[in-house]
Image (tube, grey):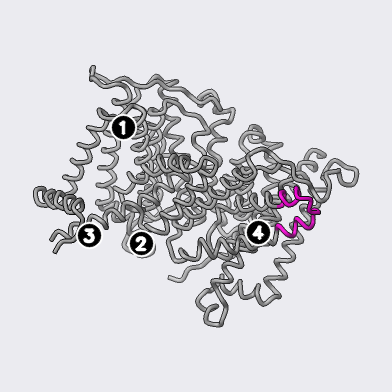
Amino acid sequence: MELFLHQFLAGLATGGIYALMALAIVMIYQAIDSLNFAQGEMAMFSTFIAWQLLQWQFPFWAAFFLTIAIAFVGGFVIERVVFKPIRHAHQLAHIVVFIALFAIINSMAGFLWDFSIKNFPSPFGSHALFGQRLISAHDAGMIGVTLLILALLYGFFRYTRVGLSMRAAAANPESARLVGVRVGRMVALGWGMAAAIGSVAGMMIAPVVFLEPNMMTSILLYGFAGAVVGGLTSPGGAVIGGFAVGVIENLAGTFVPYVGRELKLSIALVLIVAVLTVKPSGLLGERTVHRV
Amino acid sequence: MNTRPLWIRIVAAIGAVIVMVLPRRRLAALILVIAVASILPFTVKNFILFQMTLVIVYTVAILGLNILTGINGQFSLGHSAFYAVGAYTAAILMEHGGVAYYWTLPAAGMVCFVSGFLFGLPALRLEGVYLALATFALATATPQILKSSPLEPWTGGVQGIILNKPDAPLGLPLNPDQWLYFFTLAVALLMFIGAYNLVNSRSGRAMMAIRDNPIAARSMGIPVELYKSLTFGLSALFTGVAGALGALAIQFVAPDSFTFLLSVALFVGLVVGGVGSIAGTFFGGLFILFVPNIAEHISKGLAGAVFGIILILVIYLIPSGLGGTIRLFLYRLLQGTR
């Protein structure tokens, strides 16, 4: 029982990582109706910027918020420069451009900061919480940050004018444009926010997995799995999904033979395929209905 | 009157002659391709020949993806998995079953057809990004599954399996590289003819109808689910045969050759070659083999960035892919000669 509890809490801790990533994925899905395969690399690059700022003796929180701002501007600019010209192109073209971005960002990070593994400090410290070895202070802090971001997003989308405009632009671009919403700008704003959330995810994840250009690849897959489990249209669902994926991964790894060390990524595969087959809208997502 | 440069006029004249002399243009083009492809092995070094063999292998793999995406309108970022299944089927049959190399191709094709069909069944309900996502997960999980200990006695785990290069049969005066090239070329031609006939058949038209309008296709009496699964299986079959050919050419299979990056390469080849253009797949094969090398020549440290920028330029400048662009160019050229 203690083993179960321990694994459950450890799962919640890693689930926090996936939840943050899933949140960023859902944000961008809301804005552009497509999945950003370069999301993980964008987060990684932001984390490197934070690392560089820390090397330049910035205090942690100053570097933290500066990085968020830089990531926001970066996401906004990427949308304006790269994606605006091909907005009406086929979805295949979009996926290819995501792949191109992936290659560019990954290669740039390796070029600027090389491929050696770097330590990234945790703002919460790594000591055990409550004198127990169940969950560390960083894990608890990460879960707290995830929930805080979720609450902020909820408020933003429900109570602010910009948030409502963004939802309108995503739900029905033509009508939104008719009532005066700058749809193109809203899409770019969605990119900026997704990049900013991704940068927070990166900075929270980096103390756990260490910082290097390829740190995000498998985390992105779990983030996708979390987003699918929770529903691609629901930020709250994405967070719950992310935690669920973390817990399932840890419990399956402990209690199902073979799966543990060797087939961890397959758990994400099975989860994605199973959820999409049984309930494609996810736990909290809305069903998309097309008019014929 | 005609102000075009000389070389264009010469090319146009040759084109016009081909058109006039041989009314069956496609057959003429096919003969031309076979002629060029047959001279090649005797004029270039073995390493370049090896690269050309790989280009043909990738071309067949992209052809499989093109049947799925170009003809049937389904996504896949997971074709590295089927490529891997094909390669491993061939390698395991040769290593543990002592099967001759040419018999491994139909086996690889059948195994991939069945696994593609089975994966296609749940994937049926998915569209667009959802399907991209499920197949992305498949591609990412594949190397781990291949490495896992229950499969290790057959797959050789991380070490993989080393294969021997087949010699030319019947005492033909060809070295193994040349023989393998011709063997691969012959198989590829068969696959291409098969794909061409498939696309122009009743079944092919049904697949395209599903791509263009699934609801209309259903009301015309096309069993949409069955066709989508079958297309997934067929697509996997092509890619699996390519995987088996690739295993023969490289003489080695290992889990880390079949990562998500291979899927990405095939997908990039598909879009660069031209979605739905069967001849364009060859340009896709050329692109994914040579452009990463070119990018590395331009800048070693930033090879990925150069590759990405080339990719974005291709999407911006020739959205219909190289196949579509060349077709357009030839069409204009022929118009100009009238």
- Judge whether residue A234 can be spotted in this image: no
Say the numbered circle drawn on residue B332.
Answer: 3
State how far apart marks 1 and 4 are (Cα): 48 Å
What amino acid is labelled 4 in the image?
A: Ala
Magenta part of the chain:
A50-67
At 65% across and 44% down in the image, what residue appears?
A113
Residue at image position (86%, 43%) is: A128
Please, is residue B20 above or below residue B45 in the view?
below
Q: Given the image, on which type of amino acid does mark 2 rest? A: Asp
The tag on residue B184 is 1
- Which quarter of the figure is the C terminus of chain B placed in? bottom left
Q: Does the magenta stretch include residue A175?
A: no
Distance from Cα at disc 2 to Cα at disc 1? 34 Å
**Dominant secondary structure, magenta:** helix
Q: Which mark is residue B158?
A: none
Q: Which mark is residue A71?
A: 4
Q: Closer to us: mark 4 or mark 2?
A: 4
In space, the residues marked 1 and 3 are separated at their CA atoms by 33 Å
Query: As drawn, which residue projects farthest toward the top?
Result: B171
Q: Which of marks 2 and 1 is nearer the N terminus?
A: 1
Task: Determine whether the residue tagged by mark 1 lies in a helix, strand or loop.
Answer: helix
Q: Is residue B146 left or right of residue B185?
A: right
Instruction: Say whether residue A292 is left or right of residue A273.
Output: left
